[in-house]
Image: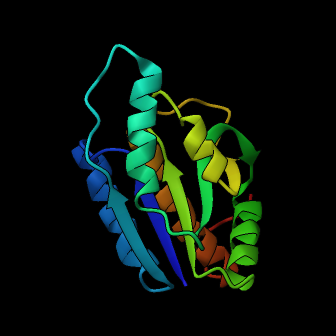
Amino acid sequence: MKIVLLNAGKTRVSFVADGIQFYTSRINRYTQWDIIETADTKHMSDIKAMQRDEAEKLLKQIQPTDFVILLDEKGTQHGSIAFAGALQKLIESGNRRIVFVIAGAYGAHEVLLARTNEKWSLSKLTFPHQLVRLILTEQIYRAFSIMRNEPYHHEG
């Protein structure tokens, strides 16, 4: 089983890249973990065309048998424990690759939405898509620590 973080474009913010590297080293203790970044899409005046270009690049990285979770503001919100439970259920379902997709700043094109198995939201708050990469990576690490009853996650 492998978990993949698939991003539209490159990670450009150094503290985000550092944080992702930090949590990646921890996630790798639990599972195979991969981060894929597509080539950047040049800004276009036509937002739909830009979304479609990003979607096509992302779809090239998705295999037919992948279980695809798109991070989307309209997706299902989970607290950390529910997030861990949902991820554990997907792992136990025998999925060979679970792919979390973070589209570009303008959201996902309908061709990407059509390939998505589920949509999850990290918060009702709006975050820069660069920062979402780090937040999601930390939450995946947290989920594994919850699944294994390790002391990282504290309930208050």
Give me the residue at 61% from left, 31% from top: 125
Residue 112 appears in which quarter of the rendering? top right
Front in this rendered view, residue 139 or 11? 11
Image coordinates of residue 151 in percent, x first then y, are 61, 77
Front in this rendered view, residue 78 or 93? 93
Residue 29 appears in which quarter of the rendering? bottom left
Residue 134 visible here: no
Residue lying furthest top: 45
Q: Is residue 48 above or below residue 111?
A: above
> What quarter of the picture does the C terminus occupy?
bottom right
Image coordinates of residue 117 in percent, x first then y, are 69, 57
> What quarter of the picture does the N terminus occupy?
bottom right
How many numbered circles are shown? 0
Locate residue 108 relative to residue 28 in the image: left or right. right
Q: In this view, does 72 lie above or below 126?
A: below
Give me the residue at 45% from left, 76% from top: 27
Residue 21 appears in which quarter of the rendering? bottom left
The image's colouring method is: rainbow
Locate residue 137 relative to residue 116 in the image: left or right. left
Image coordinates of residue 85 in percent, x first then y, are 76, 70
Residue 88 visible here: yes
Front in this rendered view, residue 122 or 34? 34
Image coordinates of residue 82 in percent, x first then y, are 77, 62
Front in this rendered view, residue 150 or 22? 22
Q: Is residue 136 above or below residue 124?
A: below
Give me the residue at 26% from left, 47% from top: 39
Locate residue 106 relative to residue 156 in the image: left or right. left
